[in-house]
Amino acid sequence: MAQVNDRATTGGAIDSRKGFALAVLCAAMFLDALDTSVVGVALPSIQEDLGLSNTSLQWVVSAYTVAFGGFLLFGGRAADLLGRRRTFLIAMGLFAAASLAGSLVSEGPLLVASRIVKGIAAAFTAPAALSIITTTYREGAERNRAIAIYGATAASGYSLGLVLSGLLTTADWRLVFFVPSVLAAAVMIATPFALKADRPSGERRSYDAGGTILVTAGALLLVFGLVQIPHDGLFSATALLPLGGAVLLLILFVVVENRHPDPAVPLRLFRSWTRSSANVLALAFASSSIGWAFAATLYLQEFLGHSALRTGIELLPYGLTVVVVANFVTGRLVSAIGIRSVAVLGMTAQTLGIGLWIAVGTDARYALILMPGLILHGIGNGLTFSTMNIAGVSGVKNEEQGIASGMIIASFQIGSGIGAAAISGVLTAATNGTSDAARVDGFQVSFLTAAIFGVVGILISWLGLRTSTPKAAAPATEARPEAAASPTPS
């Protein structure tokens, strides 16, 4: 497997050689998260320079999201079948090339195409990177610490993307695409030095092409339909037809997987109550957090009239809190009190933080309401994001770590689409008029809806995740097949 051959350190500490590998993998996660937010501030400049319509401009953002979410399970399985380092390296090269192409285009369709390619590349790097971590670090305190650091980079990438976009756009919007291409190239160059070559583990009897096509097409249609809801409405043809098609394809996918001797997505992975609950938690967590972010950005920019750069700076306490908590608290806390307790604490803090935003008014009241809410939300996010990743890959066989990683990330992406769609619909329905008071009412109901998603996450954490404190286990390569198929909480 792609790993650094060192002895496990005690207390969850990470030695320097494994640290170099982790830094490279985290840099890739940072870029994946960065690309979800860094384009936002540059959109007006892109529209003016390339002469894009509002619909085309929407797809500069949505193309990445749809491709990323749609290809995640395919990317995770590819990492298992082709080798994790190989998959990671090729996808990172594709990411760098697509980003560079985006900085050079002169037409809107070419920019959208580059975003699609970047999304596909990210769908391969993300599960490959997470599965390298889970097969490199011993299950228990060491892995918990590594996954917590990995999770922190996602939050920092998203938050810094909001600020970095404003700074780069003041010079030239093309830098928003060029700078990530340079960073991706650096990651690609460092990869052979940081990660050893690996060979796919386990004997593959056949390749499930049908299942792969069905799950990829179904996921693409599902994410596409969710992305369309905020723009065209839930009952529009552009939303209902893809969503209906996704349901049919995914049902057919389950039928095919049940009959295939070597399925693309082994359904036995869902027999673990904790692992299944972690994926459902990812849906609720993302629906709450990303739904809040959707409404919060609109409140700060469109209602209060703050610039995109100022909005990014105002949201920084959230991102910085996530980084601190995930880096220095989460891994140790999971090892001390267990996954369920940390997830419940995290979702409770996140929900309370979002709940403070229900009190927003016609003025910012930043220090009194918004900043405390951001910090509480950041604490909860930092605790929960890494914890659900730990739960989602715990006890999985080495040769299935890629698909398990892809599943948990895909659940998060789908939850993001659900949250944005739900909050967008609620905001429209709850805003009765154009007065400031009416608009504030709409935002308050939107934040309440995001908080309700958070309450659902608390219940899932309490009822679904295991209660025992995770103990240091053998490396993933030594995990017994029957452990992954156990119907009991793992």
Image (tube, rainbow, N blue to C red):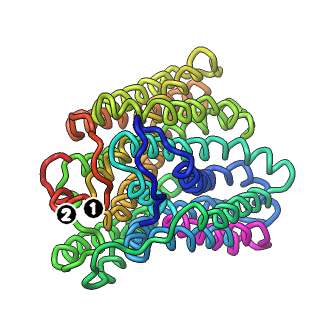
Of label 2 and label 1, which has the lower sequence position? Answer: 1
Return the residue found at the far right: 171
The residue where tag 2 is placed is 481
State left or right for residue 28 relative to residue 230: right
- Point 67% across, 30% down: residue: 314
Badge 1 marks a residue whose secondary structure is loop
Nearest to the observer: residue 452 or residue 192: 192
Return the residue found at the far top: 368
Horizontal and vertical percent for residue 33? 57, 51
State left or right for residue 163 relative to residue 334: right
Mark number, residue 480: none
Residue 326 magenta-highlighted: no
Mark 2 near mark 1, Cβ–Cβ under 8 Å? yes
Where 390 sits versus 201, above or below? above
Nearest to the observer: residue 58 or residue 110: 110
- How many C-alpha atoms fall within 10 Å of the one at disc 2: few (<14), some, or many (≥20)? few
Nearest to the observer: residue 424 or residue 278: 278
Count of numbered tags: 2
- How many C-alpha atoms fall within 10 Å of the one at disc 1: few (<14), some, or many (≥20)? many
Residue span colored magenta: 99-124
The residue where tag 1 is placed is 397
Type of amino acid under label 2: Pro
Q: Quadrant of residue 448?
A: top left
Alpha carbon separation for disc pair 2 and 1: 6 Å
- Point 38% across, 70% down: residue: 80
Horizontal and vertical percent for residue 93? 63, 71
Q: Quadrant of the N terminus?
A: bottom left
Type of amino acid under label 1: Lys
Horizontal and vertical percent for residue 139? 33, 48
Regarding residue 104, the answer to whether it shows in the image is: yes
Q: Quadrant of residue 399?
A: bottom left
Badge 2 marks a residue whose secondary structure is helix
